[in-house]
Amino acid sequence: MAIHKLLLFYKFTPIVAPQAIRLWQRELCDRLGLKGRIIISSHGLNGTVGGEVRAIKQYTRSTREYPAFSDIDFKWSDGTASDFPRLSVKVRDEVVTFGAPDELRVDDRGVVGGGRHLKPDELHALVAERGDQVAFFDGRNTFEAEIGRFKDAVVPAATTTRDLVQELDSGKFDHLKDRPVVTYCTGGVRCEVLSSMMINRGFSEVYQLDGGIVRYGEQYGDRGLWQGALYVFDNRIKINFSEDAVIIGRCEVCAEPTEDYRDCVADRCKGRALLCDDCASTALCERHRSARAGAA
């Protein structure tokens, strides 16, 4: 049986002809039998693809042959092409949709004016030196943080990535502007943008976790500062770094510990709910639970 893997990757670099890159990447993935999602913009590309290891290795070699992507950092993860329903390769205004494409600046070295990258061991060194002064800032959507986050992290009220801009502009995090702030997200791509936005808004000491939670989990598993499960945007829904992972999520109905998101059973609803096994039989998202309660 063929072995399958997933790749997570991104690269910020100026792209003059995004549509040409889209056609090339689409043909390459189709030919290799890969599925997943790739987003391309004038700022670079961001993607997750899955397939047979042989095909994945060929994809990495072929993509790195393009000079602007020669040093792209590919992160390997357990999974298969079937974790995605299809292949999607699209051109958009932003690699990550913050709703502020004109604010981001990139050059051939990456994002201009972003936070300093910290590898996992450098992050631990910073915490050892500065202690409670270090603020972990979650650059993901709030529901992702419900099942896993860094200890004592600041979690903005963000339903989508666009909400992070409004959260920053609200002033509610201004008290962090003179403290060391470490931004983190799944693989690092959202923090490339987020950290630059924070610096633009007067945060004086901003870092980003290099390689994101994925790289941190590879090195420290559940023996470090990370707690819980990692939410992922494919059919796996979440992953754990070890059997020692703690469950920090709470069922939305009964508050029992759980890390399992269930698809809402309401007709045509794409929402999900964090539910324990006992409450899973009524798998409704919060909106539909409230509607049912109001009709009762």
Image (cartoon, rainbow, N blue to C red):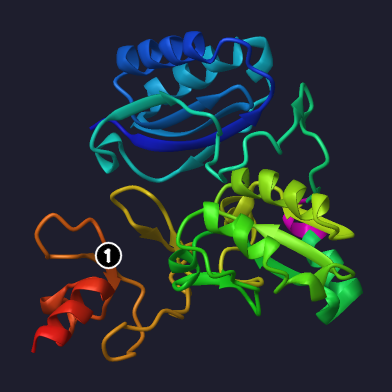
* Mark 1, residue position: 272
Q: Nearer the viewer, residue 217 or 187?
A: 187
Residue 64 part of the magenta-drawn span? no
Q: Residue at x 60, y 16 (%)?
A: 64
Q: Secondary structure at mark 1?
A: strand
Determine whether, in the image, residue 241 is placed left or right of residue 151.
Answer: left
**Could you tell me if residue 139 is visible in this image?**
no
> Residue 107, image x and y in percent?
77, 24
Q: How would you classify the magenta stretch by its main secondary structure?
A: helix
Quadrant of the rendered structure where residue 287 is? bottom left
Question: Residue at position x 59%, y 56% from top?
Answer: 213
- Left or right: 141 in relation to 133: left
Q: Which residues are magenta?
A: 118-122
Q: Residue 79: image x %, image y %?
A: 35, 44
Asked if the stretch drawn in magenta spans residue 119, the answer is yes
Q: Quadrant of the N terminus?
A: top left
- Tell whether 55 sits left or right of 20: left
x and y percent of residue 250 in the render? 38, 83
